[in-house]
Amino acid sequence: MARRAIAVDLGGTRVRAGLVAEDGRVVMHREAPTPAQDGPDAVLGQIAALVAAVRQAAGSDAVPVIGVSAPGPLDTATGVVCTMQSLDGFDGLPLRDELERRLGAPVALENDGIAGALGEWRFGAGRGTDDLLYVTLSTGIGGGIIAGGRPLRGRRGLAGHVGHIFFAAGWERRSGGHMPCFEDFASGTALAARAREAAAGDPGSVLHAADRIDAAAVLAAAAKGDGLARRLVADEAAAIGTGLASLAHVLDPALIVLGGGLAQALPVLEAGILAAFGQNAKPGFEGIALAAAALGTHSSLCGAAALAFDPALAAGRG
């Protein structure tokens, strides 16, 4: 029987545990809302319960290591969380040790952006590509890097936080004290903020009277021909393409894979992204292969499974 792995994805607003086949197919999965404000004990207990359900389905056929993808930044060399803004009480937590204790199995722990890159490289849009940049375009911007057929982690496993490259040092600092970065310009949150400000002064736009303006609402309005929404989408594509050009100058990837909610609108955004990329790329960097994540919401889950199948890919222990 082909090998199968148990994997966990702690990213986003839901926790997922799944049984993943060696070809990357998600055989089954269980998920539940993340009790983000209830502290580590509640979240880890929820993970253990979901894994127990998957184990029951797996029987004795699963590989012994459990792969876990989690938001960070987290130090995957030691398994300790640096900070986790999305979950209360996780800062400084020895997450890998806690998971191994509760799950009773070795755990391969990975930052969710790197896990997403691993999933797309091993099973998805990046198969056969040794140099890949994976970028998640959602409420924020994250990512992961495959370089020379290996995940690029850096000193502490923190590499790949691509949303925090700085765009313009001369601009006004953000509320957190940092200069504006890629995420400040090109995330879904940034698009929604620009749209709310612009719609307030444009009664001719359907967004002006909208009860809720988020990135999805802007994209939907643009698809219906709304002039303001189309301009906002064009600006969004330009911001994404400019950020990707900056990253390409450093990494020289063969392929850029886009995941996250905004990537679902790639057919609408792609022409503008490629135009901005071409305008900002230096000679030698102009050509780019761009693809949407093939695994959808399972990129990080499948990446965690890849670590379980091949522990040599996992970060070392401190």
Image (spheres, rainbow, N blue to C red):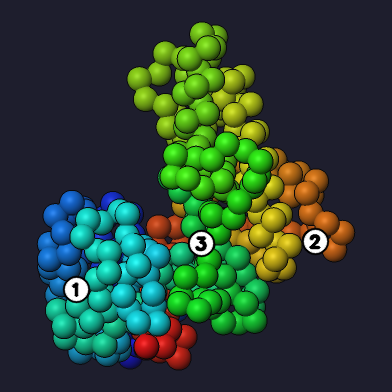
The reply to whether residue 84 is in sight is yes
Q: Earlier in the sequence, mark 2 or mark 1?
A: 1
Q: Quadrant of residue 255?
A: bottom right
From what the image shows, is residue 251 above or below residue 213?
below
Amino acid, disc 2: Phe
Q: How many marks?
A: 3
Q: Which residue occupies 49% across, 57% down?
A: 142
Residue 212: x and y in percent read: 37, 25
- Closer to the camera, 245 or 134? 245
Residue 154 lies, in percent from the top left, at 53, 77
Q: Secondary structure at mark 1?
A: helix
SS at circle 2: loop
Kindly identify which residue carries mark 2: 285
User: Residue visible at 59% across and 29% down?
Assistant: 232
Is residue 28 in view from this perspective?
no
Q: Which residue type carries mark 3?
A: His
Q: Are marks 3 and 1 in contact (CB under 8 Å)?
A: no
Task: Confirm or deny contact between disc 3 and disc 2 (CB under 8 A).
Answer: no
Give percent across and percent down for residue 14: 26, 55
Q: Quadrant of residue 230?
A: top right
**Mark 2 closeness class: few <14, some 14–19, many ≥20 residues within 10 Å:** some
The quadrant in which the C terminus is found is bottom left
Residue under pointer 3: 161
- Is label 3 or label 2 in front? 3
Q: Which mark is residue 78?
A: none
SS assignment at label 3 = loop
Q: CA distance from mark 2 to mark 1?
A: 44 Å
The residue furthest right is 283
Q: Which of the two labelled residues, at mark 3 and mark 1, occupies the earlier sequence position? A: 1
Identify the mark at residue 51; answer none if there is no mark. 1
Q: In the depicted view, which residue is nearer to us: 234 or 266?
A: 234
